[in-house]
């Protein structure tokens, strides 16, 4: 029979050694550090830079924010003099006044067009308009 080797496990170079009891036996185990790949490191760096940019943007927004109002105005600072019914009555009165003005302008334009049509319809007597000198048979040369 061959003697078996009891300590064939050698501790790995990385990490710390830890002594633990396993069913009464003391066993040496190596605590391995979490090894991160290059891609994971780059992804984490990208995430950190993006969050840093976001934080800077938030800080800039906070700097640009207006200063808080030290003394707020009371609710009755600009009280209503008249209610909405009075305001509506004023609006309706203004609307009616504009409507009357439009109607008056329309009537005035209609009267002007009628006068223009009447003048255009009149017969023109040429001797009376141009004068007798225009129609003289005597030629002054």
Image: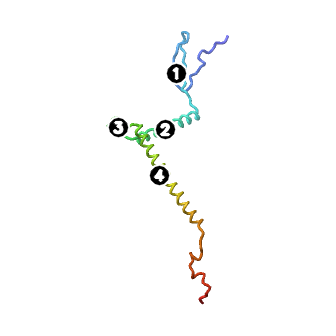
Element class at badge 1: strand
Distance from Cα at disc 2 to Cα at disc 3: 44 Å
Q: 10 Å neighbourhood of mark 1: few (<14), some, or many (≥20)?
A: some
Residue labelled with disc 1? 17
Q: Which mark is residue 79?
A: 3
- Comparing marks 1 and 3, which lies closer to the viewer? 3
Q: Earlier in the sequence, mark 1 or mark 3?
A: 1
Of 41 and 75, which appears nearest the observer?
75
Q: Which one is in front in this view, the residue at disc 4 or the one at disc 1? A: 4
Give residue 54's mark: 2
Are the residues at dot 2 and dot 1 in contact (C-beta closer than 8 Å)?
no
Task: List x then y, in percent, for residue 8.
Answer: 60, 18
**Label 3 element class:** loop
- Which one is in front in this view, the residue at disc 2 or the one at disc 1? 2
> Residue at point 54% right, 18% down?
28
Closer to the N terminus: mark 4 or mark 1? 1
Q: Nearer the viewer, residue 10 or 107?
A: 107
Earlier in the chain: of badge 2 and badge 4, it is 2
Q: Earlier in the sequence, mark 4 or mark 3?
A: 3
Above or below, 129 relative to 27: below
Residue 121 in view, yes or no: yes
Density class for disc 3 (Cα within 10 Å; few <14, some 14-19, many ≥20) is few
- Residue 52: image location, x then y, percent: 48, 37
Secondary structure of residue under mark 2: helix
Q: Quadrant of residue 91?
A: top left
């Amino acid at each position: 029979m061959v003697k078996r080797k009891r300590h064939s496990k050698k501790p790995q170079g990385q990490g710390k050694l830890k002594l633990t009891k396993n069913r009464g036996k003391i066993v040496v185990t190596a605590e391995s550090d979490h090894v991160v790949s290059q891609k994971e490191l780059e992804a984490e760096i990208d995430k950190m830079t993006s969050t840093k940019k976001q934080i800077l943007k938030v800080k800039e927004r906070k700097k640009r924010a207006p200063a808080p109002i030290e003394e707020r105005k009371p609710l009755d600072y600009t009280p209503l003099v008249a209610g909405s019914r009075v305001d509506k009555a004023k609006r309706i009165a203004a609307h009616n006044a504009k409507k009357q003005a439009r109607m008056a302008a329309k009537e005035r334009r209609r009267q002007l067009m009628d006068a223009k049509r009447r003048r255009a319809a009149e017969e023109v007597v040429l001797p009376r308009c141009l004068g007798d000198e225009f129609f003289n048979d005597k030629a002054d040369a």
